[in-house]
Amino acid sequence: MSDPLTRLNEVFQDVFDDDELTVTRSTTAQEVEGWDSLMHVTLMVNVEKTFGIRFTSSEVASLKNVGELIDLITRRGDGKGLVVHA
């Protein structure tokens, strides 16, 4: 199974309909064109489906960048099939 960042890049490309979009751990919403509050909800729903996990609203609200999202995915997934590269 691919690492969370690779899988997240695929989700971002699908949600934002941009095959050239690449995110890193430091990427923030301000850096991605079209990442507004509505797209954030769509993105989080797609992330939940992709990784087979559910987030609480407070978890989602506390995220500052993609790296924090990866950390949350790893924690919530209990490591099931997730490979994290330091």
Image (cartoon, grey):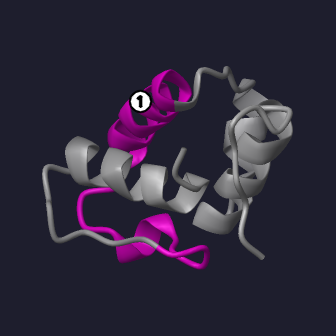
Magenta residues (range): 24-50
Q: Is residue 73 left or right of residue 28?
A: right
For badge 1, the amino acid type reads Asn
Q: Main secondary structure of the magenta part?
A: helix
At horizontal 77% and vertical 55% (from top left) the residue drawn is 71
Residue 30 shown in magenta: yes
Please name the residue that numbered disc 1 is placed on.
46
**In the rendered image, which quarter contains the C terminus?**
bottom right
At horizontal 14% and vertical 59% (from top left) the residue drawn is 18
Residue 47 shown in magenta: yes
Residue 65 appears in the picture as rendered: no
Above or below 27: residue 34: above
Q: Is residue 17 left or right of residue 65?
A: left
At horizontal 57% and vertical 30% (from top left) the residue drawn is 51
**In the rendered image, which quarter contains the N terminus?**
top right
Q: At which x and y percent is residue 43?
A: 41, 39
Q: At which x and y percent is residue 48?
A: 55, 26
Q: At which x and y percent is residue 34?
A: 24, 58
